[in-house]
Amino acid sequence: MANLTHLTIKAALDGLSKKEFTATELAEAHITAAEAARHLNCFVTETFDHARAQAKESDARYAKGDAKPLDGIPIAMKDLYCTKGIQTTASSKILEGFKPPYESTVSSQMFDDGCVMLGKAALDEFAMGSSNTTSAYGNVINPWRSTAHDKDLVPGGSGGGSAAAVAARIAMGATGTDTGGSIRQPAAFCGIAGIKPTYGRCSRFGIIAFASSLDQAGPTARTVEDCALLLKSMAGHDPKDSTSVNRPVPDYAAAIGKSVKGLKVGVPREYRMDGANPEIMALWDKGVEMMKDAGAEIVDVSLPHTKYALQTYYVIAPAECSSNLARYDGVRYGLRVPGDNLIDTYEKTRAAGFGDEVKRRILIGTYVLSAGYYDAYYNKARKVRKLIWQDFIDAYQKCDVLLTPTAPTTAFAIGENTQDPVTMYLNDIFTVPASMAGMPGLSLPAGLSSDGLPLGLQLLGKPFDEETIFTAGDVLEKAVGFDALPQTLQKAA
Amino acid sequence: MSIDKNTVEKVARLARIRLEDDKAEQLAGDLNKILGMIAELNEVDTAGVEPMTGVIDMKLPEREDKITDGNNVDAVLLNAPEQTAGFFVVPKVVE
């Protein structure tokens, strides 16, 4: 029997339907892998028994011949998705012990399709971070290691637990949420694929809110095709989320294996920034050449407001977070620190329950929304956001997709980039613009750096045109032929 | 615009977060770095630009005004730090 944890989702579904192995065997193989890799700290909560029970049900369906589209596929669920009766923390102390009495729409759709949940994957606290070092439950460690030094590396963030679990062959896929790059940047750092679909494509119901005008659910997996299979299950209209869009969900996997002949691939010149990492720029050039060789037409485009995207993000996301996180007051759920009176209880609870980065963002958000600054900061940022969106709309007059790097660096060591919050924010420089504009974006592994770490390229598409991204991503993935394994797995193999 | 320790304390009160005595000074430094970055937005000419709230051009959907959910007292109180007789309990707010 093949090494079950190294299969793609596509291959695993094939093997399950041909009865080469059972869902229980598949789940057990992943549970064993997860137990062997506990030092990576991928999960806040392991749900192995839950996985075993779901796998048993999958096997029963396979036996009866009525298997579901993703029956028996072991996944990690980002701990931002409410899961009924299973602790959901957002990696925050303020939600320790919180057991939602309901299920998020996206996770319920995945369970209806037969997914098996191995655990709740760690993230930066409330998805605020780019390194997974703001979790209240410890750092997640990237399964990749640099050949230049022996320090533990970050998996990126916020979805570091999800990305590390998929890269370490603990889970075949994982859910993520992307507000400014939280699916794509960790995917790049961990050498896997991940897609943030168009804003409105997936329901946000039951996903703990960070910045509601930006948050979007999406999958991460080891291949572009696997992401397409997962997204099909996650996407769709939900009356419980008024921003979810009522349009049919295409069969995304049908976009795999198509040609890009004549496809117009835009290369935004503003992404070539001063002081950029030359290795990453060279990889980008290589990606452009590969698309050209595959028959795509390369188009030079301009996104003139790119350099203001991060600034816009750091007004709008904190503003929305300060409002969304007002609900954590120690009254209805989560932590309560008793005080002398109600306000004292609020203040002490929030002081003890939130970590430093969350506090910083709540304070920035409260400040930019406060009387006297609302116009200068918040409204100004909303206007610039419109210009950023317009840049994309204009660019898409000239091209079908955009090709860019995903992140400005490779995975860095735990503890780096913490001296100044702004340095950490720069990680999202290539992912934030599409977030501000609500455009879909896919990251896929495209090579290794000179010190042996994965590098990602990003494909951005038109609103609700995930299919073109999948087609282009699949072509690029095949041209790249990325087959490197994290060093921790090479040793084990 | 730069903010001082007093402003941080005022904003923290608005946000209902108690700060340790030595925290406000350090936070003022962090927040000023972030605000310094944000201030670059002033370079952008936004005359005549409508502020954007959401990226989707969509009217807020409406549904029939009828009860679709409710009567779940136990589920609602399931995670309450303190409860009694079907209510959340908080410190006394009215004398």
Image (cartoon, rainbow, N blue to C red):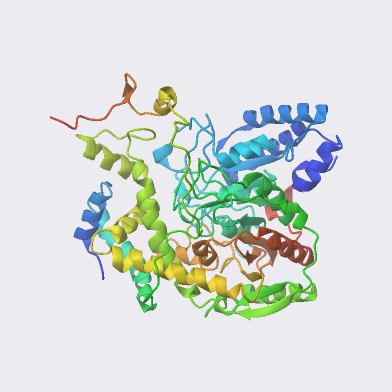
Front residue of B54 and A448: B54
| In the rendered image, the vertical position of residue A234 relative to residue A440, given as above or below | above
Task: Report which quarter residue A185 is drawn in.
Answer: bottom right
Front residue of A239 and A177: A239
Report the label total.
0
**Looking at the image, can residue A482 be seen?**
yes
The residue shown at (27%, 64%) is: A373
| In the rendered image, the vertical position of residue A442 relative to residue A44, given as above or below | below
The residue shown at (46%, 58%) is: B54
Q: Residue furthest top?
A: B85
What x and y, as percent, mark residue A477? 75, 63
Side of A390 relative to B17 (left or right) = right
**Looking at the image, can residue A421 be seen?**
no
The residue shown at (64%, 55%) is: A194
Q: Residue furthest left?
A: B95
What x and y, as percent, mark residue A454? 66, 62
Side of A212 relative to A236 (left or right) = left
Front residue of A422 and A101: A101
Dividing the image into 4 quarters, which one contains the N terminus of chain A?
top right
What x and y, as percent, mark residue A207? 50, 43
Side of A206 relative to A331 (left or right) = right
